[in-house]
Image (cartoon, rainbow, N blue to C red):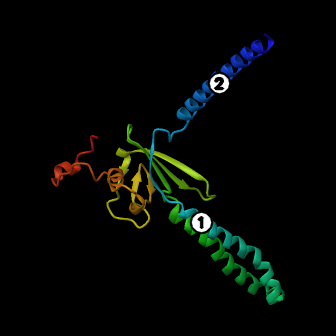
Amino acid sequence: FKIMQNCRIFLRLSAIKSQARKISFMFFCFILSYFDTKASAVMLCDSCSLAGVKMFSYSTSAASLFLMPQILLKTGLGVQSFALQAAFCGVIGFFTFLTPILLHIITKGYIIRLYHNPDKDVYTAVTYSVFLTEKKSVFHQSQVRIPAVSKMFTTFYAGQVGFLVNPDIFPVPHDYNHLMGYDKPFSFRADDMDQPDKS
């Protein structure tokens, strides 16, 4: 009798545990779908090569800063005149800091990942900051503006922010066409070009 009673208690406890697991799993999924902005968005493109390039640039700049005192001591420049030391450190320091700064200025708008919410037609562009942390920018397709004169490091503007995107990394070409607004109807009449977009 005690064995049967213990078995019933064990079955009830296991049933309660399974119910609790189901409830906790459903709650976890609800939290994820509520807070994750990517849950209803589709990733259109992914390019992760920029992080390696920036990391290589930062590492070479740090290595040159670390090796500069050693070079001054080993070559005898440390005992030379102050003007020679200043010229040497100025040239090395200029290229040491110029390369990562210039690389960041060129690639600060480069999109490494792009998400699209087709229900709201909203895009989430992920770019890198100067410290290689991901920065998200959210914009609507109607905010996308193509520059009148093509620029080397700007594919389109979203509001006042310029972005650079590579069309070749889109697996589906229509996604790029929709982003740029190439799938919209157009007219060659000058009157229609002056009118604002109503979509």
Out of 161 and 41, give the one closest to the viewer. 41
Residue 146 screen position, x and y as percent: 34, 56
Name of the residue lying farthest toward the front: 1
Depicted 196 relative to depicted 87: above or below: above
Q: Residue at x 49, y 53 (%)?
A: 113
Distance between mark 1 and mark 2 Cα atoms: 46 Å
Going by the numbered disc 1, the residue's amino acid type is Gly
Out of 170 and 20, give the one closest to the viewer. 20
Depicted 13 relative to depicted 111: above or below: above
Depicted 32 relative to depicted 94: above or below: above
Going by the numbered disc 2, the residue's amino acid type is Ser
- Residue labelled with disc 1: 52
- Residue labelled with disc 2: 18
Depicted 82 relative to depicted 56: above or below: below
Q: Residue at x 82, y 89 (%)?
A: 76
Q: How many marks?
A: 2
